[in-house]
Amino acid sequence: MELKDIEMRPNRQASLKTRSLDEWLGEYVVIDYGMIMLCREGEADIRVNFTEWRLNPGAVITLFPGDVVSITSKSEEFKAETLRYAASLLREASLQLEHTVYSELKADRCRTESATLTSIVSNMFALLRMYFEQEGCTCLDQLVLLQLKAFFGLSSQYSITISLGTCFQD
């Protein structure tokens, strides 16, 4: 499936794009935006703030403004679909999250074995893609904000219930 890339436009605070992340290969980059990344093809090792994760197809990782990121290795076919958003959208989306929950999300930012979470993120990206492709869509930032609120609310609930073993049995 070939996905159309939608770049961040000057009047928008978000972009949806399929990327190989070559610009992070062997480099340490401090990002000033947030990103939800879904590995679509291949494999990559990503280091975030000195912790390394292996991304395989279906893996979901969340990056936050101020993170130091690097791709330490990747296969030639590695591709990730990414939702990149301005720090201001993240601040607004996480207003209702308690600091402890937010800290847990940052500590446990990568899920590699959850078909449920992969499906949720994949469908969220598909929904947003439909709006990103509409040239006249004036409410895109608001739609991304609402999806981020839902994602972070779900992620915090997911982290809590996984430890209790009560939800999202894959």
Image (cartoon, grey):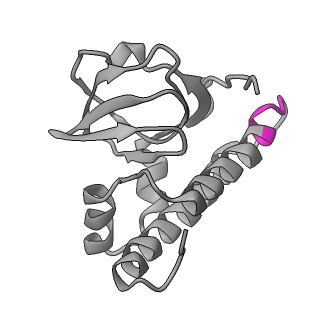
Q: Residue at point 58% right, 58% down?
A: 115
**Quadrant where the C terminus lies?**
bottom right
Front residue (pair 35, 57): 57
**Quadrant where the N terminus lies?**
top right
Q: Residue at point 49% right, 60% down?
A: 93
Q: Quadrant of residue 94?
A: bottom left
Q: Residue at point 49% right, 19% down?
A: 20
6 displayed left or right of 14: right
Q: Which residues are magenta?
A: 130-135
55 displayed left or right of 57: left
Q: Is residue 133 magenta?
A: yes
Front residue (pair 91, 17): 17
Q: Vertically, is 38 above or below 25?
A: below
Q: Is residue 132 magenta?
A: yes
Where is residue 41 shown, x and y percent of the image? 56, 29
126 displayed left or right of 74: right
In this view of the protein, can residue 136 be seen by the observer? yes
3 displayed left or right of 33: right
Where is residue 30 shown, x and y percent of the image? 25, 29
